[in-house]
Amino acid sequence: MKKIFTTSILMLLSIIVIAQPCTNVEEFNRKKHRVGGTYGHPYTMFDKHNGKTFDFTIKDIRKRIINEFHPANPGPVCAAYQQVYNNAVGAMPKDDGMMTADGNVSNLALWAKNNAFVFLIGLDGDGKYMDTTEYAGVKSFATRNAFRDRAYHPYEHDTTVNAFHHLKGDMPSKIKDLKIGSRSLMLWLTCYDLLKAAYELPELRDSLRNPFGFADADRNGLACSPRNKLRKLTRDLYQESQGVFGVVTHRYGWKKNHGIAAASALLMAAQVLNDAGVETNVLQGNFLFRMFGGMGLLPTLHGKHV
């Protein structure tokens, strides 16, 4: 009996050590948030009200980076992109994705977001295209794809790629730390949003290089999928934000700028995860999902990647 008890304690401790912010709470069909009449990512970093397509915006950014490149004195847009690029090509940070050991915003979250951004832009630090033509006219996508894989790779869990796999920290419960957790969550939400936006670029979608399908095609994936990790972290932040002593609704007022950070993260999550959640209307949710989902009629995430 003593041996069984000891083994059980060790198993419990091991589960706690390797625990990740995951959830297996099932999603059902939700109403879709449309911006300017369109539905789909990105919801962060890019202006969706300017009447320009996302593809045009990406090409316009590339043009400015290329035109401003100078080995000694690059223009402001190029210089800013070089900082993002240089961080992205560095080694993967070792924090848990929510807070560094010294109590700052996660370096892993920033690294992941920067890798996702470089993957979309597709230029190196010198303003050169990473999708190059090699022998026999065959394009090599490996260099650019590596930035996607460092942010998220569905089949790799090693120490050099897949930052989302290494997101293992929970949302802090102490008010003084919620500001840091909120800012880290915003970086992860942006990273996820940018990776989802790859579907909106024909050059990536047509060659099946987008890591996610259209919009909410990745709902109801594995418990520790990027989407489910973000759902869990957002839910925990919401729980810590409300109530008499919540960081946002605290009876004695907002705790400095901690409440502002938490509210900002929740607002961003409401945009990026706008179609996520548990449906409360049985006819719209559980019944239809189980009927049509079980028949294979609902969209699913494609599994082929170049």
Image: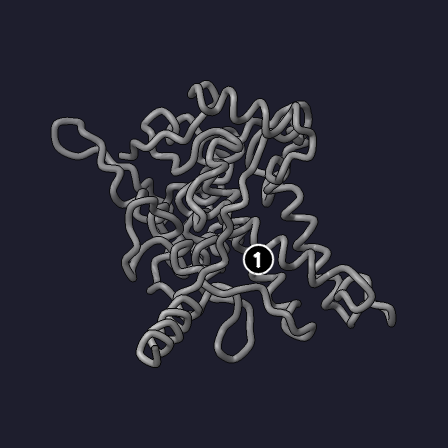
Toward which corner of the image does residue 179 lie, by quadrant?
bottom right
Toward which corner of the image does residue 46 lie, by quadrant?
top right
Q: Nearer the viewer, residue 58 or 117?
A: 117
Q: What residue is drawn where x is 36% and y is 63%?
A: 92
Q: What residue is drawn where x is 50% and y is 45%?
A: 227
Q: What residue is drawn where x is 39% and y is 44%?
A: 119
Report whether 200 appears left or right of 2: right
- The percent coordinates of residue 193 (x first, y second) are 53, 43
- The percent coordinates of residue 62 (x first, y second) are 45, 39
- Amino acid type, callout 1: Leu
Q: What residue is drawn where x is 66% and y is 31%?
A: 33
* Residue 50 in sight from this viewpoint: no
* Residue 116 in sight from this viewpoint: yes
Outermost right residue = 252
- The percent coordinates of residue 88 (x first, y second) are 39, 57
Q: Identify the residue under disc 1.
A: 185
Placement of 253 over or under 153, stated as above or below: below
Number of dots carrying numbers: 1
Report whether 144 appears left or right of 177: left
Toward which corner of the image does residue 10 lie, by quadrant?
bottom left
- The percent coordinates of residue 2 (x first, y second) are 34, 81
Image color mode: one colour
Q: Quadrant of the C terminus?
A: top left
Q: Quadrant of the N terminus?
A: bottom left
Question: Mark 1 packing: few (<14 Cα in 10 Å), some, or many (20+)?
Answer: many
Q: Nearer the viewer, residue 198 or 155?
A: 155
Outermost front residue = 1
- Secondary structure beneath dot 1 equals helix
